[in-house]
Image (spheres, rainbow, N blue to C red):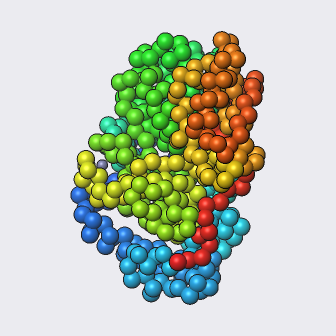
Amino acid sequence: MKITLYRSLPEPIRSLVRLTYSSLPFGIRMGRTYRETVKFLRSKEGYGLEEIEKWQLERLRKVISHAYDNVPGYRQLYDEAHVSPADLKSADDLKHFPFVTKEIIRDNLADFTARNIPAWKHLYRTTGGSTGIPFGFYLLQENIEREFAFLHSAWKRAGWKPGDSSAVLRGAFVGSEEKFWDYDPFLKDLRLSTYYLNEKTYSSYRAKLLTSRPTHLQAYPSAANLLAELIVKNGDSRQIHFSVLLLGSENLYSWQTAKISEAFPSSRIFSWYGHAEQVLFAPMCEKNRALHMDPFYGYGEILSDDGRECAIGESGELVGTSFWNTVTPFIRYRTMDIGRRGEMKCPDCGRPYQLLDSIEGRLQELIVTKSGRYISMTAINMHSDVFDNVRQFQFRQKESGKVTFCIVRKDQYGEEDTRKIRTELMKKLGDDMELEITFVESIQIPKSGKFRFLIQELPISYGDHDRPR
Ligand SMILES: [Zn+2]
């Protein structure tokens, strides 16, 4: 029984399925590809740099050959660029192959779909609009199982175990104000609605968490931050306890980490970088907070706006090649995410993996100044006590050099707060920015559960990567 199929069944059949399957071991329930991938990843622990590079090159050759033979869009791109699979003699040669973008895949999906995989196997998946370019692509059931295997293998390093229960505050379940939770027996997930979590409903969420006592919390950072704020405000720190906080799918900002640690002082925070397209995956280390690009998931490049490989300490766009999606291959795919290159080896766990010092965020989460500088939301410290009387906030930008800071005020908010906030924000924004502060009644969390701290209406691009180098 596949998880996707299970969710589409009517409730009476679901309960029958639950009875049958909940007694099976976790690995069996998750599927064959899941089990194989867990085993595969275990066998790769301890690989040295040379072994990794050898494995990656073999895999890249397979991916490029498959795309050239079976995916007309890639065949055309490579013919036009005068490259072919034979040109890939080392991983470094990949830079001669053209990029693909979200627009290219969105506008030509049929051409970027492999001809040698029967259509009944294709699963259609859409990505949210956080990059400003919503689009869909195909993958296979095995990709879903493999994704869980990668994720769970990383979580295990943080202390999560197969079969552990979790509260889940993501976008998968919306519900209603009365029925704000749902239970997924496959994964032992207590799924809570992010959409309906607010001051009015907090006591019901609290009661549900205290009676169910899930071991971990899986959440979007913005949702965990919202729960943390409510917990702190109601003096419930330490009351609701999770062993590990598994925070992914959105950038985790330091001001959020501070608030979340205040609400859950004895919980471990574990985060990772990843996205719906399943091209790159960078989970945190078990020994420090650095993100490690998983070399068996996808091939990652970090490119400056003029197309160079970034040096250590430099930020650039993450460009990825998926090792596993054969239906809609992503090869040199521009993710529109910006990250800062770290060392090539982790000093604490010893893995020879590319480290990411930070994820600056999606391109659509950057503020653009008058002179064309980008300001990342990571640079703005929202945990300062200057914001104590702010209930909720959101930046909105419509023109370069000008940003609006929308505030939902707490009762005790006064003139002095506006002055302090302006001074604090201007320190981070700089002289080439104008700041407007406005008050709003409320800021709605979208149904997807992903909160956007910046509504960026400017089209943002990052350098000219159109030509292969
Ligand atoms: Zn490490």
Q: Residue at x 65, y 20 (%)?
A: 417
Q: Is 64 displayed left or right of 436 in the figure?
A: left
Q: Is residue 377 visible?
A: yes
Query: Residue 332: horizontal and vertical position, in percent?
Result: 52, 69
Q: Residue at x 26, y 50 (%)?
A: 347
Q: Which residue occupies the extreme front position in the image?
A: 431
Q: Is 35 displayed left or right of 256 in the figure?
A: left
Q: Residue at x 49, y 49 (%)?
A: 359
Q: Residue at x 62, y 85 (%)?
A: 80
Above-or-below relation of 219 to 298? above
| Count of numbered marks | 0
Query: Residue 176: horizontal and vertical position, in percent?
Result: 68, 27
Q: Is 157 displayed left or right of 420 in the figure?
A: left
Query: Residue 363: horizontal and vertical position, in percent?
Result: 61, 52
Depth order, front residue of 62/300: 300
Q: Is residue 115 visible?
A: no
Depth order, front residue of 101/111: 101
Above-or-below relation of 93 to 47? below
Depth order, front residue of 298/310: 310
Q: Is 329 displayed left or right of 196 in the figure?
A: left
Above-or-below relation of 231 to 51? above
Give residue 73's quadrant in the image. Answer: bottom right
Query: Residue 115: horizontal and vertical position, in percent?
Result: 60, 76
